[in-house]
């Protein structure tokens, strides 16, 4: 039975690496999608140095129609938090209508602890949600559960939900340290 699976974890938890590993282990015959990868359009890149070309998801791309045209045996989508809720629904349609496995990889929440629209819809529709076993660490050594945006060495709590580029960096924090900053 085909499934829509959402693999999630904080930044630096190996999501892109796992997406590329899944693709490799299945014979590299499926279609890879990504949206707003740090390496540029149409690329899935991991911090370990693995890189693969992928279809860049744009606002107007109908994922159901695209998968149907490609006749792919499975679908892997990295940076799935950046999908629109409608596109997540299209992926659910791929699973239910075409009986094709869809594996999505992404973070759940932004630097303010709020769900991304794509992540929210994946939580609502996924057949399975799995937190990746590799865990990024907070500076205190605990498992990181949240992402923080850092500008000039200071955590910030306001700004656009998605911002690619600029002088920001990101940190991963345990819930205790994340909540200490937003309380």
Image (cartoon, rainbow, N blue to C red):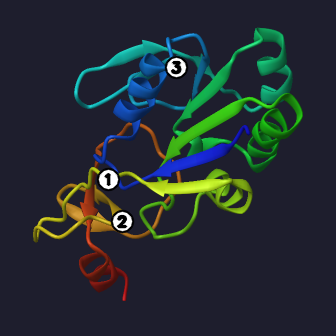
Label 3 vs label 2, nearer the camera? 2
Earlier in the chain: of badge 3 and badge 2, it is: 3
Measured Cα–Cα span from mark 2 to mark 1: 15 Å
Q: Residue at x 45, y 67 (%)?
A: 158
User: Considering only vertical position in the picture, is 36 above or below 105?
Assistant: above
Q: Return the residue at label 2.
A: 146
* Residue 112 picture location, percent across and down: 45, 69
The local crowd at label 2, few if under 14, some if 14 to 19, many if 20 or more residues have their Cα within 10 Å, is many
* Percent position of residue 166, x then y: 35, 40
Tell me the residue at 42%/63% (across/down).
111
Asked whether 106 or 96 is in front, the reply is: 96
Dot 2 falls on a residue whose secondary structure is strand
- For residue 41, the mark is 3
Residue in the image at 67% along x and 33% along y: 101
Quadrant housing the N terminus: top right
Q: CA distance from mark 1 to mark 3?
A: 28 Å
Front residue (pair 24, 114)? 24
Q: Position of residue 124 (x, y in %)?
A: 72, 62
Q: Is residue 97 left or right of residue 105?
A: right
Q: Which mark is residue 153?
A: none
Q: Could you tell me if residue 40 is visible in this image?
A: no
Distance of label 3 from label 2 (alpha carbons): 25 Å
In which quadrant will I find the C terminus?
bottom left
Q: Measured from the top left, where is residue 3 in percent x and y?
A: 69, 42
Q: Which residue of the protein is positioned furthest toward the left in this rendering?
A: 140
Dot label at residue 133: 1
Q: Given the current orientation, which residue lies at the most extreme bottom position? A: 183
Identify the image quadrant of residue 40.
top left
Q: Is residue 138 visible?
A: yes
Tag in front: 2 or 1 = 1
């Amino acid at each position: 039975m085909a499934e829509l699976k959402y693999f999630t974890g904080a930044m630096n938890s190996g999501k892109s690496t796992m997406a590329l590993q899944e693709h490799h282990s299945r014979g590299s015959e499926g279609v890879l999608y990504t949206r707003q990868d740090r390496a540029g359009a149409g690329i899935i890149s991991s911090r370990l140095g693995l890189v693969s070309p992928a279809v860049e998801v744009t606002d107007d791309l109908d994922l159901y129609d695209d998968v149907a045209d490609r006749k792919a045996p499975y679908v892997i989508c990295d940076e799935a938090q950046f999908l629109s809720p409608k596109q997540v629904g299209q992926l659910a349609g791929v699973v239910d209508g075409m009986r094709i496995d869809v594996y999505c990889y992404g973070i759940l929440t932004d630097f303010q602890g709020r769900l991304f629209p794509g992540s929210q819809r994946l939580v609502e529709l996924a057949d399975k949600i799995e937190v990746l076993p590799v865990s990024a660490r907070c500076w205190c050594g605990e498992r990181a559960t949240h992402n923080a945006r850092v500008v000039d060495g200071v955590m910030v709590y306001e700004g656009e939900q998605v911002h690619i580029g600029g002088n920001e960096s990101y940190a991963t924090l345990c819930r205790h340290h994340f909540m200490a900053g937003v309380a």
